[in-house]
Image (cartoon, rainbow, N blue to C red):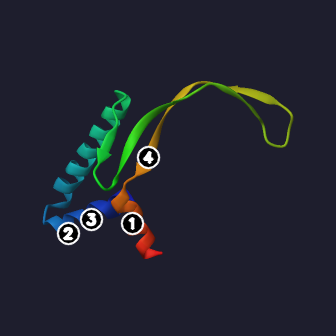
């Protein structure tokens, strides 16, 4: 699902205008990003949690060659689905 489709669906379900809905969703996403930048976890009960992680520097091989390359340390995000989300996905299968 694309962001524009999400905005349209939320707007139709809530009765808010498309512009208001877009502002709310953008603000929500910005808040999540800001929290993760500040090394804070973000969790939504039943849905899941986003957790900032540090990926350590390491050496990797380039596929198909024997060349080694050093990969720098970087920040990442780990998503852990909640119980309700896991259950909902399993019921649809």
* Between 2 and 72, the one nearer to me in the picture: 72
Q: Is residue 85 left or right of residue 66?
A: left
* Between 17 and 90, the one nearer to me in the picture: 90
Badges 3 and 4: C-beta atoms under 8 Å apart? no
Q: Residue 14 location in percent, x, y?
A: 15, 65
Question: Does residue 6 sit above or below 27 in this rendering?
Answer: below
Residue occupied by mark 2? 12
Residue occupied by mark 4? 79
The image's mark for residue 70 is none
Return the disc, 3 or 1, that comes first in the chain's sequence.
3
Residue occupied by mark 1? 87
Q: Secondary structure at mark 2?
A: helix
Work out how far the residue at label 2 is from the one at label 3, CA to CA, in angstroms: 6 Å
2 or 1: mark nearer the eye: 1
Badges 2 and 1: C-beta atoms under 8 Å apart? no
The image's mark for residue 8 is 3
Badges 4 and 2: C-beta atoms under 8 Å apart? no
Within 10 Å of the Cα at label 1, are there few (<14), some (14-19), or many (20+) other Cα atoms?
Answer: few
């Amino acid at each position: 699902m694309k962001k524009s489709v999400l905005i349209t669906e939320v707007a139709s379900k809530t009765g808010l205008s498309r512009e208001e809905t877009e502002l709310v969703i953008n603000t929500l996403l910005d808040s999540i990003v800001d929290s993760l930048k500040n090394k804070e976890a973000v969790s939504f009960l039943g849905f899941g949690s986003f957790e900032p992680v540090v990926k350590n520097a390491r050496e990797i091989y380039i596929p198909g060659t024997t060349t080694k390359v050093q990969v720098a340390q970087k920040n990442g995000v780990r998503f852990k689905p909640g119980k309700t989300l896991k259950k909902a996905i399993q019921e649809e299968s």
